[in-house]
Image (cartoon, helix red, strand yellow):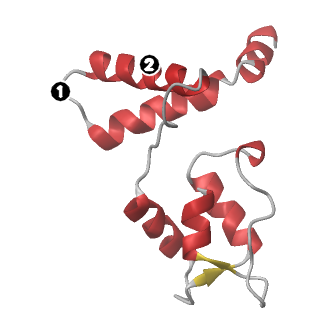
């Protein structure tokens, strides 16, 4: 329980998930060097010296949106938005809980991509 508490408090599991996902997406020839650069980018961002580490590009995020937009409406509801964010590996504290919605209380793809 102490180990689990420590990992949760220090947010180690999301970090490991992010690094593992990055490895699987990029499949670098030298995974150790790649991971060192990924961790350095995360440290730089944390210290306000760099951009946030981005795992998915706009096309990837658009495809995640389309995967949740089963009826191909071009919009998703809030529950689908939460599902998509969880598919990206985000916890509820990691993303905007109240994204911009249209007049039908739906979230457009561009809003989803921005929030993700």
Give the mark count. Answer: 2
Distance from label 2 to label 1 (Cα)?
A: 18 Å
Q: Is residue 86 above or below residue 18?
A: below
Front in this rendered view, residue 67 or 10 = 10
Mark 2 surroundings: few (<14), some (14-19) or many (≥20) residues within 10 A? some
Q: Which label's residue is closer to the chain start, 2 or 1?
A: 1
Q: Quadrant of the C terminus?
A: bottom right
Q: Is 116 left, or right, of 19 in this rendering?
A: right
Asked which secondary structure carries label 1, the reply is: loop
Picture coordinates of residue 114 (x, y %)?
58, 61
Mark 2 secondary-structure assignment: helix
Q: Nearer the viewer, mark 2 or mark 1?
A: 2
Q: Residue at x 79, y 58 (%)?
A: 97
Q: Which residue does the numbered mark 1 point to in the structure image?
A: 29
The quarter of the rendered structure image containing the N terminus is top right
Residue closer to the observer: 110 or 10 = 110
Residue 12 position in % (x across, y down): 63, 22
Could you tell me which residue is drawn at 76 percent across and 71 percent down?
78
Residue 93: mark: none
Above or below, comparing residue 29 to residue 58 in the picture: above
Position above or below: 24 against 71: above
Count residues near mark 1 (Cα–Cα under 10 Å), then give few for <14, some for 14-19, many for 20+.
few
Q: Position of residue 59 (x, y in %)?
A: 38, 64
Look at 74% across and 10% down and name the residue there: 3
Is residue 64 found left or right of 114 in the rendered image?
left
What residue is shown at x 34% (from left), y 38% (from top)? 24
Q: Which residue is mark 2?
A: 40
Outermost residue to the front: 49
Point out the residue furthest to the left here.
29
């Amino acid at each position: 329980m102490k180990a689990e508490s420590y990992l949760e408090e220090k947010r180690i599991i999301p970090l490991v998930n992010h690094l593992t996902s990055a490895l699987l997406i990029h499949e670098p020839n030298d995974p150790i060097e790649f991971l060192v650069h990924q961790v350095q980018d995360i440290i730089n961002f944390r210290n306000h010296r760099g951009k946030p580490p981005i795992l998915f590009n706009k096309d990837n995020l658009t495809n995640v949106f389309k995967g949740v937009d089963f009826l191909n409406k071009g919009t998703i509801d809030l529950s689908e938005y939460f599902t998509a964010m969880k598919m990206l590996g985000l916890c509820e504290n990691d993303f905007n809980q109240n994204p911009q919605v249209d007049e039908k209380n739906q979230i457009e793809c561009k809003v989803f991509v921005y929030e993700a």
